[in-house]
Image (cartoon, grey):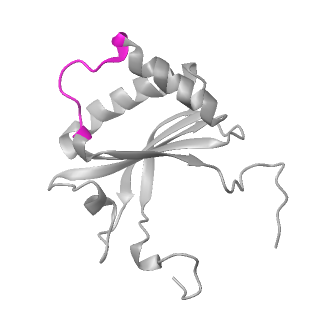
Amino acid sequence: MGKDMPFDGKRMIMGGFDSIVEEGSPAGGSYTDGFVVPVPEGKRDAYQAMASKMAKVFRQHGANRVIEAIGDDVNHGQVTDFYRAVKAEVGETVVFSFIEWPDKTTRDEAWKAIMSDESLKPEGEMPFDGKRMFWGGFDKILDTADARAPVSA
């Protein structure tokens, strides 16, 4: 990264991920939830099945799009990386996911409903260690996929 970047490029985390679940399409929403979670290689199919089920739930509650993507080209960094961020153990890979919402209000109401729905409580062992998962909500600052947005040189 160049010395004139508005951030410390040495601490930037980046990687390539292969989509394993994709529901919906970009619809110009203004709010995004992001998740990163370690998944044991032997539980990939179980994780994908759970993620596919939950993607449909998020869409039913107003999400525009849900993407679940598994690490495909994720390097170990010198300062930090996705593996360190989730304290990945030997035999684990990293899943990066996001949910696009029309707005924060829709997201907040959806999460209230989802978290209070007893039928969505996990049965049995989860296919990942939730204690090492991290997540956050993000306001949109740039969307180059929005066809209405002017492109500047």
Name which quarter of the figure residue 89 lies in.
Answer: bottom left
Q: Is residue 122 magenta?
A: yes
Q: Residue at x 27, y 21 (%)?
A: 122
Residue range in magenta is 118-130
- The x and y percentages for residue 85 are 30, 58
Q: Residue furthest left?
A: 90
- The x and y percentages for residue 146 are 76, 49
Tell me: residue 33, above or below residue 152. above
Using residue 76 as the reference point, say whether residue 53 is left or right of it.
right
Name which quarter of the figure residue 46 lies in.
Answer: top left
Using residue 145 as the reference point, say whether residue 42 is left or right of it.
left
- The x and y percentages for residue 70 are 37, 48
Q: Residue at x 23, y 42 (%)?
A: 131
Q: Residue at x 61, y 24 (%)?
A: 62
Using residue 14 as the reference point, say whether residue 84 is left or right of it.
left
Q: Residue at x 82, y 73 (%)?
A: 153
- The x and y percentages for residue 49 are 34, 27
Q: Residue 30 versus residue 67: which sits nearer the camera?
A: 30
Q: Main secondary structure of the magenta part?
A: loop
Name which quarter of the figure residue 27 lies in.
Answer: top right
Tell me: residue 133, above or below residue 7. above
Tell me: residue 12, above or below residue 39. below
Whether residue 63 appears in this view of the structure is: no
Q: Residue 139 versus residue 80: which sits nearer the camera?
A: 139
Q: Residue 45 versus residue 109: which sits nearer the camera?
A: 109
Whether residue 28 appears in this view of the structure is: yes
Using residue 9 as the reference point, say whether residue 131 is left or right of it.
left
Tell me: residue 80, above or below residue 113. below
Q: Residue furthest bottom?
A: 3
